[in-house]
Image (spheres, grey):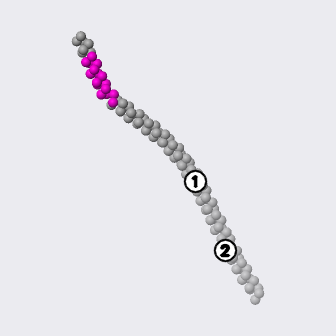
Amino acid sequence: MNSIYEKEKKLSEALEKLNLIKPDNFYQKETILNLDQQKNQLEIEKKELEIKYKELNDNYQILKLKIDELSLKKEEEKKKELEFSDKIDELNQETDSLLEEIDKWQM
């Protein structure tokens, strides 16, 4: 009989210990599940941010190329404008020279 009583006592002690452990384990499992969900959410957000970054970077590169093209066009236009201005100056000088010649012949 003693052994049954001892076994029952040991079983009761084990059950008490298990009861003490269960709430902690439940809390730990819940905490782990919450952390896992947060980790998954952060991974999703990270992927979304990486996609957005790639899109922004692609757009930046496209805009940079367009700006470079516009800068080149602007430089070309300035160069043409200067050439045109030089041509006008030459024509003005020639016109002045011709007018002077005409004035000389009219006198």
Please tell me in which quadrant of the rendered image residue 31 appears: top left
**Magenta segment, prevailing SS (helix, strand or loop):** helix
Residue at the spot x=48%, y=42% of the render? Answer: 45
Screen quadrant of the N terminus:
top left
Residue 26 picture location, percent across and down: 36, 30
Q: What amino acid type is highlighted by mark number 1? A: Leu
Q: From the viewer's perspective, is residue 79 above or below residue 16? A: below
Is residue 78 or residue 103 the one in the foreground?
Answer: 78
Screen quadrant of the C terminus:
bottom right
| Disc number for residue 88 | none
> In the rendered structure, does residue 9 fall within the stretch colored magenta?
yes
Residue tagged 1: 63
Alpha carbons under labels 1 and 2: distance apart:
38 Å
Number of numbered markers: 2
Residue at the spot x=43%, y=38% of the render? Answer: 38
Return the residue found at the far left. 2
Instruction: Give neighbour class at mark 1: few <14, some 14-19, many 20+ (Cα, 10 Å).
Output: few
Q: What amino acid type is highlighted by mark number 2? A: Asp
Residue tagged 2: 89
Q: From the viewer's perspective, is residue 48 above or below residue 90? A: above
Residue 15 picture location, percent across and down: 30, 22
Image side of residue 103 versus residue 16, left or right: right
Please provide the residue range marked out in magenta.
8-23
Is residue 64 or residue 8 the one in the foreground?
Answer: 8
Tell me the element at label 2: helix
Residue 99 picture location, percent across and down: 73, 82
Q: Earlier in the sequence, mark 1 or mark 2?
A: 1
Residue 19 picture location, percent across and down: 31, 26
